[in-house]
Image (cartoon, grey):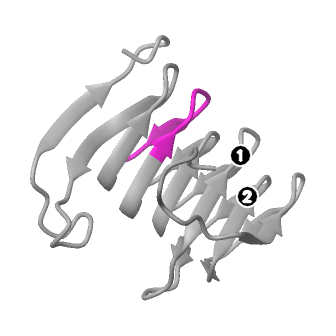
Amino acid sequence: MFGNRNNKNAPIDSLIGAGTLIEGNVNFRGGLRIDGSVEGRVTGIDGETTQLVLSEQGRVKGEIRARRVLINGEVNGPVFATESLELMPKARVQGDVHYQRIEVHLGAQVTGRLIHSDANGAAGEEPGKIVDLKANKHGI
């Protein structure tokens, strides 16, 4: 899901299906794919190789925290990706984005700050470089 890079992706262990609404926090291990909606925090359990995939029809209203995050849907809240973040063309994020490595595809939109953390610190705790990004409809 993050392309054919040299990292090992967590398999998708759980699915929140299209048409499903979860009101409350979601804690997960391994991989989670969201095709439905979550109103609450979505958190990969610390110490685990966690991967969150938010599909084009997926929605999260709340904070996201995971080691690897791929977004192609809508997020209203902060995103913390402690290893890597990929914003696909249909990604719409309203909130600050904390990352160690990031890939932004043409068309992705972020209304908030991009906050880089180095490999020594957890995302968002001691940010290095802060970049304001207000992408237009073309992603630039």
Residue in the image at 64% along x and 55% along y: 53
Q: Tell me the number on the disc at residue 55.
A: 1
Name the residue tied to disc 2. Answer: 34
Tell me if 47 is positioned left or right of 60 in this view. Answer: left
Residue in the image at 57% along x and 66% along y: 51
Work out whether residue 63 can be spotted: no
Magenta-drawn segment: 86-95
Query: In the rendering, at what x and y percent does residue 115 appear?
Result: 22, 49
111 relative to 20, above or below = above
Which numbered disc flags the more N-terminal residue, 2 or 1? 2
Q: Tell me the number on the disc at residue 30.
A: none
Query: In the rendering, at what x and y percent does residue 7 appear?
Result: 48, 61
Q: Nearer the viewer, residue 39 or 74?
A: 74
Can residue 74 be found in the magenta stretch?
no
Q: Nearer the viewer, residue 96 or 5?
A: 5
Residue in the image at 69% along x and 68% along y: 32
| Total tally of numbered discs in the picture | 2
Q: Secondary structure under badge 2?
A: strand
Query: In the rendering, at what x and y percent does residue 72 appear?
Result: 62, 39
Q: Residues within 10 Å of mark 2 (few under 14, many from 20)?
A: many
Tell me if 135 is positioned left or right of 92 in this view. Answer: left
Corner quadrant of residue 131: top left
Tell me if 17 is positioned left or right of 23 in this view. Answer: right
Residue type (three-letter) at the residue carrying disc 2? Ile
Mark 1 and mark 2 in contact (Cβ < 8 Å)?
yes
Furthest residue to the front?
Answer: 6
